[in-house]
Structures are given as C-alpha cells and as structure tokens.
Amino acid sequence: MSRQLVVHVTHHEETDCAVLTVEGDIDRTSSPLLREAIRGLIEESRPRIVLDAGGITFCDSNGLRTLLGGMTMAFDAGGWMRLAGVRGHFERLLRMTDLYSFFAIDSDVVGSLRRASGGSVPGRD
C-alpha cells in the first residue's frame, strides 16, 4: 500500500535556504508533485534547498530521476540541494544504486542548515 506524498516548504531566511520536507512514497504518480515543488523554489530564486528525506517511505527510479533533476536545476540556478535524514528504504536504495556518495547528505536538517550558514557551498568544501 503506497503512502501519499506530502511536500511542505519552510523558508529559513537566516541561512537563505528552503527546507523541503517530503513524506510518503516518491513514485511515478507522485514524482511530478516533488518536481514542481523544487521548480517552484528555483523560480522564486531559492535555489539553496535542504530536502528533509526522513519521511520518505518508498522511492522508485522515477523518484531518483526527480531528485537528480532537482539537484541539477538547483546547481544550474547557482544553488545546491542537500539531503537530510536519509534512512531506511531510501538509504538502502541510494547505496544500492551508488548514488549515496553522489548526493550531499547530512544526518538531519539542523546539520544541513549549519553547513549552509557556514558560507560554503554544502558538499563542495
């Protein structure tokens, strides 16, 4: 049974970041919702994105493509995208596909925001 995807955006002005909290399954039917949330942030000139992945219960190849595309959109707009709270099925999937080291990953959102406030591009120090 799939869990409906819920995406919530929080803006953190002190770090000039947006936190995108994702809960549920990222699959063929829900990937467009996530893609549009990322695109919306970039169109709002908010290309520094922390994706809180702690609530992701399932992710298929469509979801991986959406995340990779989102990261590319953020980089192309002069920003970045970090993943925070990666665990469970999603962590196993990233490791199995050799994408775990491709993404900049922190243990939690606080760690990602701390990296962002350091003035460096997270994952690229």
Image (tube, grey):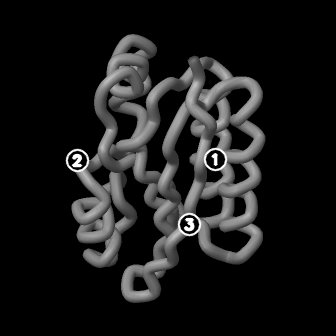
> What residue type is disc 2 on?
Ser
Q: Amino acid at mark 1?
A: Gly
Q: Which residue is mark 2?
A: 107
Q: Where residue 124 appears, x then y in whole percent? A: 35, 54
Q: Residues within 10 Å of mark 2 (few under 14, many from 20)?
A: some
Alpha carbon separation for disc pair 1 and 3? 15 Å
**Residue in the picture at 33% in, 38% down:** 86
Question: Which numbered disc covers residue 9?
Answer: 3
Q: Earlier in the sequence, mark 1 or mark 3?
A: 3
The answer to whether residue 23 is left or right of residue 43 is left
Label drawn at residue 70: 1
Q: Secondary structure at mark 2?
A: loop
Q: Position of residue 68 (x, y in %)?
A: 59, 36
Residue 123 or residue 56, whichever sits in front:
56
* Residue at 29% from the left image edge and 32% from the top image edge: 87
Q: Tag 3's secondary structure?
A: strand
Q: Indicate the position of residue 28 as horizontal and vertical percent values.
A: 73, 24
Tell us which disc is closer to us: 1 or 3: 3
On the picture, is 26 further left or further right than 84? Answer: right
In the image, 13 versus 116, the foreground residue is 13
In-front residue for pair 121/111? 111
The amino acid at mark 3 is Val
What residue occupies the far front of the structure in this picture? 1
| Left or right, residue 51 beside residue 46 | left
Tell me which residue sits at (44%, 59%) in the image. 50
CA gap between label 1 and label 2 equals: 20 Å
